[in-house]
Amino acid sequence: MSDHLPSEVVAALELLMRHFAVPAADADPWIDAAKAPLPQRAIRDAVRRGELVGHRVAHRLLVRRSELDRYIEAHRVVPEARAIATGNVRTLLGSGRRIA
């Protein structure tokens, strides 16, 4: 294929193939809810509510790392402006406000 095409075209095609390639299975590993960075109950409840996709296999609840990351990002807290202005770290960390 590269014998008949200019090197710039071959390089562009290789770049496109890398960009649109399907990721390998280990690029998005399964995580056991019991070993996840969130409490197991929080993960079970999120799966039950449909907020997180999970799979039950041999009495284990498994989630994809990308799904867990997406769920965590969806629950980001935003500090209150007053807490930032006053430097009140306790209020800042305990506000519990989420990005909508």
Image (cartoon, helix red, strand yellow):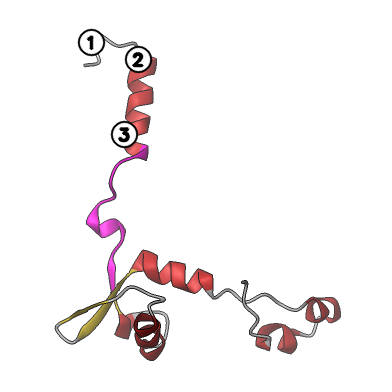
Task: Report the span colored magenta.
Answer: 19-31
Give the spatial CA distance, label 2 vs label 3: 15 Å
State the image quarter where residue 90 is shown: bottom right
Estimate the x, y position of residue 39 in percent, counting from the top left. 41, 88
Image quarter where the N terminus lies is: top left
**Residue picked out by circle 1:** 3
Q: Position of residue 42 (x, y in %)?
A: 41, 87
Q: CA distance from mark 1 to mark 2?
A: 9 Å
Do the residues under discs 2 and 3 have CB atoms within 8 angstroms? Answer: no
For the residue pair 66 and 46, the one nearer the viewer reads as 46
At 42% from the left and 83% from the top, the residue drawn is: 38
Q: Which residue is mark 3?
A: 17
44 relative position to 62: left or right: right
* Residue located farthest toward the right when viewing the structure as drawn: 86
19 sits left or right of 95 in the view: left
Mark 1 residue crowding within 10 angstroms, few (<14) / some (14–19) / many (20+): few
Task: In the displayed orientation, state which residue is furthest to the left.
Answer: 58
| Residue type beneath disc 3 | Met
Toward the viewer: 75 or 2?
75
Q: Which mark is residue 7?
A: 2
Amino acid of disc 1: Asp
Quarter of the C terminus within the rendering: bottom right
In the image, is residue 38 part of the stretch drawn in magenta? no
Of the numbered discs 2 and 3, the one sitting upstream in the chain is 2
Farthest front residue in view: 49
Q: Give the residue drawn at x 35%, y 67%.
A: 65
Q: Residue at x 32, y 28 (%)?
A: 14
SS label for mark 3: helix
